[in-house]
Amino acid sequence: MASESSLQAEVNRLRLQVEHLQVKDGSEPVYIGQYLLTRLEQLKVTKMFGVPGDFNLGFLDLVEDHPTIDWVGNCNELNASYAADGYARVKEHSLGVVLTTFGVGELSATNGIAGAFSEMVPVLHIAGVPSMAQQKTKPMLHHTLGDGRYDAYIKAAENFSISQAILTSKENAAAEIDRVLTDCITRARPVYLTLPTNLVYEKISSARLKIPLSRLPPPNDPDVQTFVIDEIVKLVQEADDDVVVLVDACAIRHDVREEVNELIKKTGFPVYSAPMGKTSVSENYERYGGIYVGSISHPEIKEKVESAKLILSIGCLKSDFNTGNFTYSIPTPRTVEFHSDHTKVQFAAFGGIGMKELLPQLTSRLQPAKRQVAVPPFTAVLPQENNDIISQAWFWPRMGQFFKPKDVILAETGTSSFGILDVPLPENSVFLAQILWGSIGWTTGATLGAAFAAQDVGLGRTILFIGDGSLQLTVQELSSMIRHGLKPIIFVLNNDGYTIERFLHGKERKYNDIAPWKWTGLLGVLGDADGTKSKSYTVHNKAELSALLDNNEFAAADKIQLVEVMMPRLDAPSALERQAELSGKTNAYVAA
């Protein structure tokens, strides 16, 4: 089935190339701006994030008048790019879209686009730019650098996008739009598109719109794929069923979760995930053993994974925080790596052999394990503490009792992203964290996009965990949530500053302090003037938090809710403490 789909995708690519070379008669002409919006509609985009500016306003007229794509005006471009990222992560088989104006807007969005590039998230960045006449004569226009370098922002974008389309005429506009959108959805990374003011309303043929774009990669070479599968099957047989499957972020990004599930269900091999791969496999599956993070893993998980005779690693991203500071103890001779565009079998790399097509073929060749290697139960036990302080060790298992199937759960970089790792999440829940890029404040904007996407795909509550320091960076986007009637639950972990930084360096330094805010007054200031659209709480101890979590009205999430959780200043999840210790040794500051 995968081979047939890949072949059809290749046929469609060739049809689009032929279409570009032919002149079609009888097709209704459309504005270039409309052509772009129709392509986005075909790719199931329903929201566009961004900030209006004088070089994108004409295009925004088309967006606002579009029947199925809604404009979500953000407070700033950075938050808009975070929102597009969060939208794309939750709404699989689609992409996130952010629209900015020339120069000032696009540079403000760059950090969010770079994070999407780093973590392989498909985001289209549309930049409204000056007309072609202005780009040619190069006047000292506002939003320029004043030195005539109209290409400076394009050069910047090249570093943070997998593909760029710099529209210059109507003759190739449709083909260029299709090219970057195809790159975005097949390679799962951001792309950049400039839309000059004079081209938005130029009319072009709509004939290409009849040919769908495909997110499937090119087909694998059948002979090489057969050889690779033969080699993997031999290794599995030699391992005598002592095989572990390790799933990571790119299994989600490159749409192979279904293929992974078929593999593990047929074989019965134990399965674990890396932090960035959390919820790529159901955490209620009886053969799922939890999170492997190198040396900071739970000892039983560490032993089970590292002692296996063969590791089938699917979509791995070996970053520091995703591997326990590069402490994977899995020798290359015992590893097969599956990626979107290549496969590694021990020391040999096979370019162009992607996992989307390979995994089903491999599964068909493998047999159910004759003996099932034991898998440690993945549970979160609520500790019995002799005080009423809301500790990190108690908070996360207690939150685990609150989660429901289909929840969308976001954890900010810091105590949240580490604390939640060892908590099993319910069936069909979605977990979002920015573990590789780690831009603090990312989750606020991402929550906005994730909540919209959750509505689109029929998921449940959107729940955010964020520290008081991180929220101060991007807090304005709470107003966008209120404005659009979204109803996330926001847990603000008030531990008086940058706790993750305190553990990395400078526990008592003033640079890790922040100004105290009245958190429960925020939602009123940011849009809920009469107090009817939101509710805010402060919980000081275990009893108050448990009472709130057990409250049916609160759990129903029928309005936006903010919970300030008072926590000790120097308390952190054990995984964060161990990671900080390893990072501290790597980044040791030595005074001369």
Image (cartoon, rainbow, N blue to C red):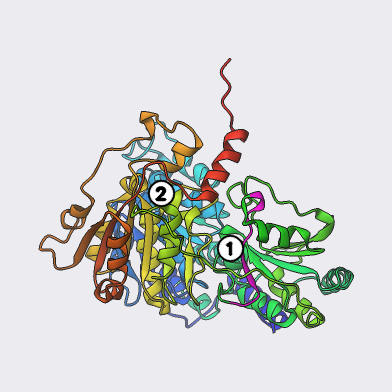
In the structure shown, which secondary structural element does the residue marked by tag 2 occupy?
helix
Residue neighbourhood size for the residue with mark 2, other residues' Cα within 10 Å, grouped as few (<14), some (14–19), many (≥20)? many
Q: Which residue is mark 1?
A: 277
Q: Would you say residue 519 is visible in this rendering?
A: yes
Q: Would you say residue 199 is visible in this rendering?
A: no
In the structure shown, which secondary structural element does the residue marked by tag 1 occupy?
helix
Q: CA distance from mark 1 to mark 2?
A: 26 Å
Question: Is 201 left or right of 166, judged from the image as shown?
Answer: left
Image coordinates for residue 87, horizontal then vertical, percent: 42, 65
Image coordinates for residue 10, horizontal then vertical, percent: 68, 75
In the image shown, does 75 or 184 lie closer to the viewer?
Answer: 75
In the image shown, does 254 or 104 lie closer to the viewer?
Answer: 254
Q: Which residue is mark 2?
A: 109
Q: Tell me the kind of residue under disc 2.
A: Ala
Location of residue 201 (image quadrant):
bottom left
Q: Which residues are magenta?
A: 285-295
Q: Quadrant of the N terminus?
A: bottom right
Q: Answer yes or no: do the residues labelled 1 and 2 have beta carbons within 8 Å?
A: no
